[in-house]
Amino acid sequence: ESVVRSALTMTPLRIHRLPTAIAAIALLTTLSVDPSSAFAPGANNKSPIQSLPTRSQTANTIFFTTSTSLNALGVFVRKAKEADVRKYCQDGPPESVLSLLQKIKDSSDKDDEVELPTELQTLLTKRKGTITIIAEYKRKLEGSGFITDVLDPVLLSPVFREFGAAAVAVLADERTGGCTYDDIVAVVEEQDEALGDVPGPLPVISSDLIVDEIQIAQAADSGAKAVTVTYGVVGEEKVQQFIKDAASLGLEVIVNVGTAEEAQGAVNAGASIISVTGVDGSDNKFAVIESLSIPEGRNVCTIANILAKDNKALEEVEEAWMCRDAGFNCVWVSDALYKAGNDPVEHPGAIISTMKAKSSVKYASPKARSGKGEGAREYLGDILM
């Protein structure tokens, strides 16, 4: 259990430092568990979680077995999340979630092609030379050492909107982000208050570690417009299934990938939005997507997840510009938004606005702090004036 908790709280840059012994143990761990039936509305004594990721069906019960090879860390993370989902189901999900889950299952039983929604994809994909921003809300920061408290979602949600974010994500995995689906509801309700205003409401993304379709039902019930699925945890078959499950509820799927192979696998599975996560540096991020083979007639939105640097400089802004210039459509920003707390110049809204600016590393750099060359503080202030 301690190993699982450690793995779940690692930042992306620390993942590869798992001791060899732990990795070996994980690889020796069997990926198959006793098949168990899915949580079904009205069913009694049913286990709510399934082994992943291959689905086979009987008349009234859905069974799962595992055939996709997962990386060592993915096994640990998936098992821990499955336990969380199992407890959620045993505690009794609300009827509204169960109704949406049944809709997913009814859709899955049909062979008809489900039309994929594209509203978020279109919103995130602007003309060449521009970048859109997904601002992620979380209550827990990964070892930033800068601030201890993040403002409530109802306070930060309007800041994200007013300073130009294209969408808001809520890290709904309580272990890693400190948030729950209640926070998604809070952000959705705040965004809805801007209906009829300019700027209007932003779509909200449920950023959870999806291992079961009931989480997709939870996200839809909370008012989210999209969910994230991590390719390295569930594999290609399950990505394809989750895309279909989400579409049955009108939700889009952002597939998190960390390698060129995962990116291509996600596209092959039908992903229309992929996010490069856990990869440091704009060049390394671009290497994940530069050789993508996209079928004719399909469009794929590419997102670069900006990792927070362990310092008070603003290198993340520069990296966002470089990702834009490399051809990414969007950047996903999380911890970097909170490094300066609610500083009047470097607050989350200022970071978002600066990342969207038309500036380039050819002409300016926000790396340096105030008083050392062209300081980040002065630079951000100039852009915002």
Image (cartoon, grey):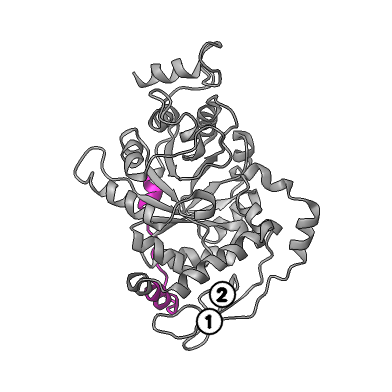
Please provide the residue range marked out in magenta: 101-123
Q: Position of residue 142 (x, y in %)?
A: 56, 42
Report the front residue among 16 and 288: 16
Q: Is residue 189 above or below residue 101?
A: above
Count residues near mark 1 (Cα–Cα under 10 Å), then give few for <14, some for 14-19, many for 20+.
Answer: some
Say whether marks 1 and 2 touch (CB < 8 Å).
yes
Give the x, y percent position of residue 92.
Answer: 41, 74
> Which residue is drawn at the image coordinates 50% and 76% (left, top)?
48
Question: Does residue 278 appear to the left or right of 183 in the view shown?
Answer: right
Q: Mark 2 points at which residue?
A: 50
Question: In the rendered structure, does residue 115 fall within the stretch colored magenta?
Answer: yes
Give whichever of discs 1 and 2 has the lower sequence position: 1
At label 1, which amino acid type do we have? Ser
Which quadrant would the N terminus be assigned to in this image? bottom right
**Which amino acid, by three-letter code, is at mark 2?**
Gln
* Pointer 2 local density, CA inside 10 Å: few below 14, some 14–19, many at least 20: many
Instruction: Report the residue marked by disc 1.
Output: 37
Circle 2 sits in a helix, a strand or a loop, which is it? loop
